[in-house]
Image (cartoon, grey):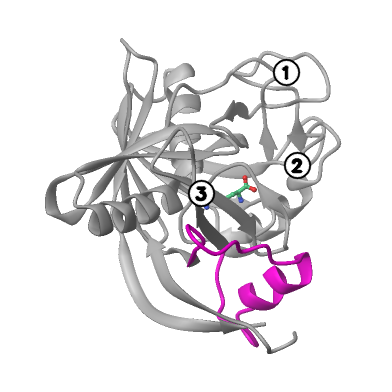
Amino acid sequence: MRTDMTRPFLKMNGAGNDFVVVNALETPFQPTVDQVRAIADRQTGEGCDQLIAIEPSEQADAFMRVWNADGGMVETCGNALRCVGWVLMESTGKTEVRIDTLGGLTTARRAADGQVTVDMGAPRLDWTQIPLEEEMDTRGIELQIGPIDDPVLHTPGAVSMGNPHVVFFMDHAPNDGFVRGSGSLIEHHPLFPEGVNVGFVHAISPDHIRLRVWERGAGLTKACGTGACAALVASARRGVTGRHATVDVDGGRLVIDWDEASDHVFMTGPVEVERTGVLSF
Ligand SMILES: N[C@@H](CCC[C@H](N)C(=O)O)C(=O)O
C-alpha cells in the first residue's frame, strides 16, 4: 500500500461482528479491492469482517457502503447498520436516523441499555429475489450436502434481507470445522449466482435459537445481523419458531421481530466502539 494518504477510522463491533468504519461524509473514500483486503487482514492490517464507509445521501441521513474482507462490495450489513446508526445518532443528537444501503433504505433508533434497533425492511422471499439460479420454494430449497440417502445438510430456507442467505436447520449447533467446511462449499454453489451467506440454526425453543454463520466474503463470523433476521424469517416460515426470537450468536445476543402488520423485520442488539486509528494509503 502507498503511504501518502491517511484516513482516521473507528474500530467497532456489533455482537462481535467487527468493522473498520470510515467517515466519508465530506471526503470520498474509494479503496481498491487490494486495499480493502489489506485493511481487513487480521495479521498485517487492522483486521475486520467488513470495511464500512459512511457517505452522504440525498434521501437519508447517510449512505452506508459495505465491503467484505475479501474486497467485494456488497449490499448491506445488519450489525454495521446498528454501529453506523449509533455514530450518526451520537453526532446529530437524533434518536432515529435513516440509512440508505445498496440493499435498501433502513431506519435505526435507540433502544434500552444502549442498544440500537434497526428496521431492516421486509424480507424478500421469491426465488428471483434471493436470487436462485432456478425456480424453487424458498421455504425449503432443493439443496443437500452429503450422501444422497442420508444427507448431512438439506432443504434450507432461502431469504434475502437485501443480501442472500440460506438457513439450515440442525439438532445441535455445529462446530467451527463443520461451519468452515460446509459453509465455504455452499457459499459458492452454482444455485446462488451472487454467492450466499450460510446460516446454521439450532432451535432451542419457539422463541430462542442458536445461530452460527459462514459469511459470504468474510468466512466464519461471531455474528451476522442480516443472518439473524434471515434465520428468524426462515424459522417462522417453517413453524420452528414464532415471529419473535432471541438469537444467540457466537459473540452475543440479538433480538429479532418479524412484524405481522408491516412485514418488516426489526433487529435489536449491542454496539461497541473498540478503538480509533488511522489508515495509511
Ligand atoms: N455481517 C453482516 C453481513 C455482511 C455482508 C455479507 N457477508 C454478505 O456478503 O452479504 C451482517 O451483520 O449482516
> Which residue of the protein is positioned furthest toward the front in this rendering?
26
Tell me the quarter of the picture where residue 69 sits: bottom right
Question: Which residues are drawn in magenta?
Answer: 22-49
Q: Examine the rendering and report whether any part of residue 171 can be seen.
A: no
> Which residue of the protein is positioned furthest toward the top in this rendering?
261
Is residue 33 in the magenta section?
A: yes
For the point 86% across and 36% down, the residue is: 190
Mark 3 vs mark 1: give the one in front. 3
Picture coordinates of residue 66 (x, y %)?
59, 53
Secondary structure category for the residue under label 3: strand
Marks 3 & 1, CB-CB < 8 Å contact: no
User: What residue is disc 1 on?
Assistant: 128
Q: Which comes before the other along the chain, label 3 or label 2?
A: 3
Picture coordinates of residue 203 (x, y %)?
40, 36
Ligand 1 near label 2 (Cβ, under 8 Å)? yes
Picture coordinates of residue 135 (x, y %)?
78, 13
Q: Examine the rendering and report whether any part of residue 195 can be seen.
A: yes
